[in-house]
Image: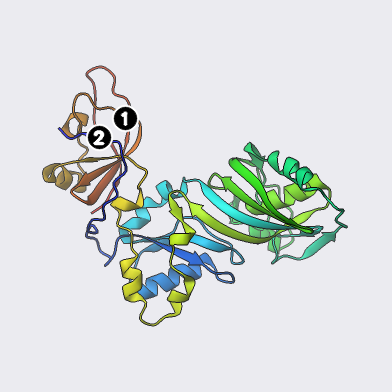
Amino acid sequence: MNKIMTQPATDIGPRAPGTDPYDGIILIDKDAGRTSFDVVKDVRRILKVRKVGHAGTLDPFATGLLVILLGQGTKLFPYLMSGKKIYRATLRLGVETDTHDPTGRVVQTKPVPKLEHGYIREKASEFIGEIEQAPPIFSAVKYRGERAYEFARKGVKIEIEKRRVKIYDLKVTFLDLPDVTMEISCSSGTYIRSIAADLGEKLGTGAHLKTLRRLSSGPFRAKDALDPKHIRIPSSHHLFRDKIIPLREALPDMMETQIDANIAQKIRHGYQPGYDEVFSSADSYEGYMKLVKGKELVAITKGHHPLGDDRGRLKIMRVFI
């Protein structure tokens, strides 16, 4: 029987065949002034891939890591989105905007006293942990079937329900009043704009998010991403192609187990294998697991610790053809 691999796979294998010429992900360092969808359109044009998406929107004014999903890679969206994010954010104290960022209309200004680094650091540390956060009114959060920003643009006031997010760490790295630069490690779904506005309120000065850069998402880093200037190079196809991360390698932190060609073919035709068809009697696991044939990602399954002799069938979450 196949044994569970406890270490992430690191070798690069061939991409699984699909309807698109490429399947996997590619890392782009988005520049300011462009939307995430602009980058998606550019990648689609350069690689001639029909199905293209991204794992986590960056606002137009923001820069940094954008994980682009290609072909079958679009099926990885929920697993890539769940990873921890790290941002570098600069706040401008004393100026509040209706969007909580530099693109909005200034709604209030206040003088900024000479605040000590230690005091700002103390107030910022109060955000660490699980917190309730209200998304900005200018956001893509759904409210009664519409995006919140649609109501905001019409001047309609709405109450967006708060959501729980987790701030793993928040460090004040540079102080040049009225600007405060921080590095924030947080869960998916965290609005850094809201942290900026809320910290400004705690400091009594008000604030908005002046700049934002995503440094990492899950295991991936902005320093490993393609520079946005390559998008504008006519002969960039080969450069982009060589930077594609295959499906199996796109989830390096997820455990995997090898399956044989017969089981792989059955799964790809809708078969739900029994636990003992994939694992030995001593194996058990919880969470998500990659089922791999050679270097190809065949499926993602969700597991559990089996009880007694009734191991049942695996729950196949995604299949890659």
- Tell me what residue is drawn at x 48 percent, y 71 percent: 228
Question: Farthest residue toward the bottom?
Answer: 234
- Quadrant location of the N terminus in the rendered image: top left
Residue 190 in view: no
Q: Which residue is mark 2?
A: 4
Q: Residues within 10 Å of mark 2 (few under 14, many from 20)?
A: some
**Considering depth in this image, is 243 or 82 the residue closer to the camera?**
243
| Residue with the mark numbered 1 | 285
Is residue 33 positioned above or below 101 on the image?
A: below
**Residue 64: x and y, percent?**
53, 62
Whole-Å distance between the Cαs marked 1 and 2? 9 Å
- Relative depth, front residue between 189 and 93: 93
- The residue type indicated by label 2 comes to Ile
- Image quarter (top left, top right, bottom left or bottom right) of the C terminus: bottom left
Disc 2 is placed on an element classified as strand
What x and y, as percent, mark residue 166? 58, 40
Disc nearer the start of the sequence (1/2): 2
CB under 8 Å between discs 1 and 2: yes
In the figure, is residue 282 to the left or right of 141? left
Judge whether 221 appears above or below 119 on screen. below
Residue 293, how many percent across, how many down? 18, 47
Residue 62, position as x, y percentages in the image:
59, 63
Q: How is the structure coloured here?
A: rainbow
**Please, what secondary structure does the residue beneath circle 1 have?**
loop
Q: Looking at this rendering, what residue extends furthest in the left direction?
A: 262
